[in-house]
Amino acid sequence: MKPKKMLLILALTALPLVIVGLWSMTVPNNKRTDLSIRSFVKVVVRHIRMFSYVPTDEELQSARKRIPLDAWGRSLLYTRVDSNHFTIVSYGQDGEPGGEGEDRDLVAELYIPSTGHVYDISKLEWLRRPLD
């Protein structure tokens, strides 16, 4: 293989890694965690669309492999409050409830109205958003 072609292949292979590295250095931890929480919300909503109910934590275990960690490398905490209501939490940099700045908890709390066993995803209501 020619050196120029090898260099081009190497550059194209490394480029995504460089972009991800630069992105993670420039985006604040709270914003990265907010994006992780929103990805988790999408997983829960997908489950609701498929199975017509808010999943328990145990039911999400297989999906956890696809859910990103918070910006500090910890799993997000999911709680099914009731059949229409769930929360997703990151305890911030310190990993402890409460705090300010980087230690502040990031919480998503959502409610999905239903009639009987039919959930209306179009009316999904954010009771609390992570960066509010």
Image (cartoon, rainbow, N blue to C red):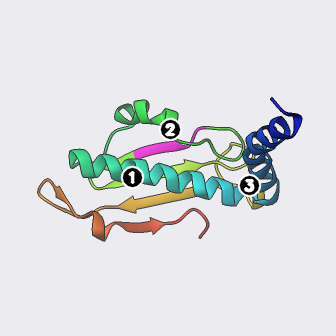
Residue 30 horizontal/vertical position (percent): 70, 58
Q: Please tell me whether mark 3 sits on a helix, a strand or a loop.
A: helix
Report how far apart the C-alphas of labels 3 and 1 lie in the structure.
23 Å
14 above or below 24? above
Magenta: main secondary structure equals strand
Using the image as rendered, state which of residue 106 and residue 31 is in the foreground.
31
Whether residue 90 sits left or right of residue 49 in the image: it is right
| Residue at the far left in the pictured view | 116
Q: Does residue 104 appear in the picture of this structure? A: no
Q: Does the residue at mark 2 contact the one at mark 1 (Cβ under 8 Å)? A: no
Residue carrying label 1 = 86
Residue 108 horizontal/vertical position (percent): 50, 58
Whether residue 90 sits left or right of residue 116 in the image: it is right
Residue carrying label 2 = 66
Using the image as rendered, state which of residue 131 and residue 66 is in the foreground.
66
Instruction: Report which quarter residue 96 is drawn in.
Output: top right
Name the amino acid, label 2.
Answer: Arg
Name the amino acid, label 3.
Answer: Asn
Q: Please tell me whether mark 2 sits on a helix, a strand or a loop.
A: helix
* Quarter that holds the C terminus: bottom right
Residue 3 horizontal/vertical position (percent): 88, 34
Crowding at mark 2 (Cα within 10 Å: few <14, some 14-19, many 20+) = few
How many numbered marks appear? Answer: 3
Residue carrying label 3 = 29
What is the span of residues highlighted in magenta in the rendered image? Answer: 75-79
